[in-house]
Image (cartoon, helix red, strand yellow):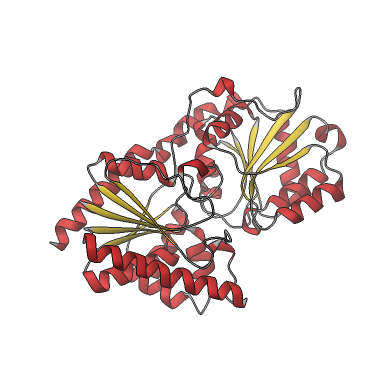
Amino acid sequence: MKLFFCTSSYPAKSKISIGSLGSFQRDWVLQLIKHGIEVFVITPAQPGDDFDETEENLHIIRYEWAGSKKGAELSSLNIFNPKDLYFAFSIFWKGTWAVLKLAKKERPDFTFALWAVPCGFFAWICKKIYKTPYAVWTLGSDIWVYGRKFYTRPLLKTILKSADKLYSDGFLLGEETGKLGGQKCDFLPSTQKLTTQNLEKVELPYIDGKINFLFIGRYHHNKGPDVLLEAINILPKEIGEKCHFHMFGGGDLEPKLREQIQEYDLKNVTLNGFVNTTECSALLRSAHFFIVPSREDSIPVILSDGLQCFLPVIAAQVGDMTKLLNDYKVGYSFPKEDVKMLAQCIQKAVKDDKQSFKPEIDRILNIFDISKAVDTLAADIQSLIKHER
């Protein structure tokens, strides 16, 4: 069976990093190959994507577009900015052409689109021309950004309604996806396998004797790293001096974050770039708590990463985070953007023995099993292909 795996963010092997949107996709592709599926990954080129791995039944096609050499982030494009509008047009045009050109040659049995925009559009066009069935896996930005804008909502609804199967990486997100698509949407966790090899050799940038907290994610408004800095700034002095906050990521908010750190003189904060999987495993295993201060989110991949390392969490009450922390007592939650409540949660966490959260973490990990998730996806795809035939 030939599967087109269309994504806007598949990382080169040398650039796999935790906190970036595409970090988990390699594990999914390798798991799909184990099911005897020949996978064609179709993704836009980015700077430095020169070292793709070679695996049997894996083909990675990177198409050039206007933002290829500039490293433009699709999630940050503003179509009311002429340059960003040009980038958006380019990704749709070049991506559609790349998928159709390859489909004419390979005649895929199925297309799996991550996410609805823009890759769901490519899958929709491919179905129109080559009758290729497809599934869409929606992300928060698909529904909560494109689904709310009058000029993108009609296209999104068309993509979802025409899909043969819908998935979402969140429960509430899945309900919204199903409403827009007019059909059932199944939960599919965006999770990955963290490395456990050679962790003892990893040098951690931690300060001895401190209680260490982690933020790993994009430096983007929706992820709320600035909210975290505001909370750190109002911590009581005796608490702040006991702690160190390590932030790993990258994005358009980074200059503002550096200004905040300097303005507040936050000597207990270290701002870093993205972290690779081995370093991330060591960090998550060594930290005290993980913090998710998002303004909008579903279930971020890094949450399941932290839970795999038995790291409790402090999370904003957004999307499915509220349900998860209500159903599973794996940490603390606070109203989104509530700086005072976040600071109070940090103060509570300082006094905790994180091992006390382990029984609940064991329980929640059942829903983030990547092998079970890929088994389900592979079975669904096989069933849909048989139905089409």
Depth check: 96 or 76 in front? 96
Q: Looking at the rendering, which quadrant does residue 388 occupy?
A: bottom left
The reply to whether residue 277 is visible in this rendering is: yes
The reply to whether residue 328 is visible in this rendering is: no
Depth check: 96 or 165 in front? 96
Depth check: 276 or 213 in front? 276
Q: Looking at the rendering, which quadrant does residue 138 occupy?
A: bottom left
Q: What residue is drawn where x is 35% and y is 65%? A: 98
Q: What residue is drawn where x is 44% and y is 40%? A: 192
**In the shown orientation, is residue 98 left or right of residue 218?**
left
Q: What residue is drawn where x is 45% and y is 33%? A: 363
Q: What residue is drawn where x is 42% and y is 45%? A: 52
Tag count in the figure?
0
**In the shown orientation, is residue 149 left or right of residue 179?**
right
Q: Looking at the rendering, which quadrant does residue 4 occupy?
A: bottom left
Quarter of the image with the C terminus in it: bottom left
Which residue is most to the top? 200
**In the shown orientation, is residue 232 left or right of residue 80?**
right
The location of residue 304, given as percent across then percent down, is 50, 39
When the figure is inspected, residue 193 is found, relative to residue 177, above or below; the finding is: above
The location of residue 99, given as percent across then percent down, is 33, 65
The location of residue 215, given as percent across then percent down, is 65, 42
Depth check: 280 or 145 in front? 280
The location of residue 150, given as percent across then percent down, is 51, 79
